[in-house]
Image: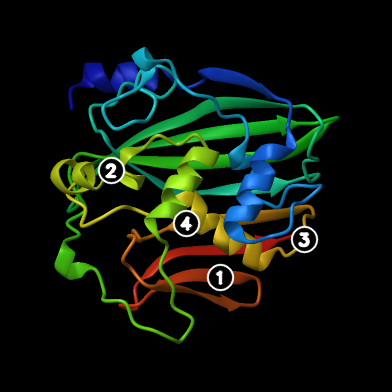
Amino acid sequence: MSKGIQAKCMSFIGRERVLNDTMAPEPAAKLANLLERSVPEALPTTWHWSYFNSALPASEVGHDGHERLGVFMPPLPYTKRMWAGGVVEVLSPLLVGQPAVKRSRIADVAFKSGKSGDLAFVTVVHEITQNGPAVREQQTIVYRDRNLGETVDSVPEARPGNGFRTVPDTTLIAYSAITQNGHRIHWDRDFCRTVEGYPGLVVHGPLLATFLADTLVETPRPCRFTYRATAPVFEATPFRIVTEGQTAKIERADGQTAMIAEVST
């Protein structure tokens, strides 16, 4: 990557975006139905990801269904996008039906090279207020210059019992709709296989994080939730949630950890 492109991407540090939301009950109700949970009056730890989303103008949609790079996110030359991890600090659980404001800022852009290729890490900081500070969040998104190398043969076969499960494509499509996530890796198999090099649809990183958060924090309360993705989960990949104290992980049937999380007060 040229120094000029790096400099242009680095110039996006400090860029901000402000979004308002009425916090209407419908997104929470739809997510609750999808996750087979009761409809909450206060949002669980990661459920705010169902809010502050809106359909994008066609001119701002990239080839992968996400917002085009260079609008808010830096104009990176890498297009293979994944959530690397993040931290959610709930200061006061968000209440359904009360308007809230979300302020987002590009905090850092870092470039790295290694055996897995060239990478760019973008750190975004979010602050949500609702009658005062409610949620502070930091997200790290990684952009790669090449595929992960996952193949059909590398996806473990489904096996019953032992708490393993898979996420059907209907759930992936519904979660994409609820969160207004147009990323094609979650609903377009042809795109996954021919463009991204994946063996099948990819389970959303935020959805996996929500599984872990809901396991560790049973009722909405102030807390600090930290999560880190280490491997993808596909629609045909059996996985289970393994907990130990204040930590939990997504364990694939092949024994590989896909995501690990921790909660603290």
Chain-order first, disc 3 or disc 4: 3
Q: How is the image coloured?
A: rainbow
Q: Which mark is residue 248?
A: 1
Q: Position of residue 33 (x, y in %)?
A: 63, 54
Quarter assignment of residue 126: top right
Alpha carbon distance from label 1 to label 2 = 30 Å
Distance of label 1 from label 3 (alpha carbons):
16 Å
- The residue type indicated by label 2 comes to Asp
Q: CA distance from mark 4 to mark 2?
A: 25 Å
- Give percent across and percent down for residue 240: 46, 74
Q: Residue at x 37, y 22 (%)?
A: 10
- Outermost top residue: 59
Q: Which image quadrant is residue 183 in?
A: top left
Tag of residue 219: 3
Residue type at the position of mark 1: Ala
Q: Position of residue 166 (x, y in %)?
A: 40, 68
Q: Quadrant of the C terminus?
A: bottom right
Mark 4 residue type: Arg
Q: Residue at x 79, y 34 (%)?
A: 133
Mark sitting on residue 228: 4
User: Does 109 appear above or below 185?
Assistant: above
Q: Which label belongs to residue 188? A: 2
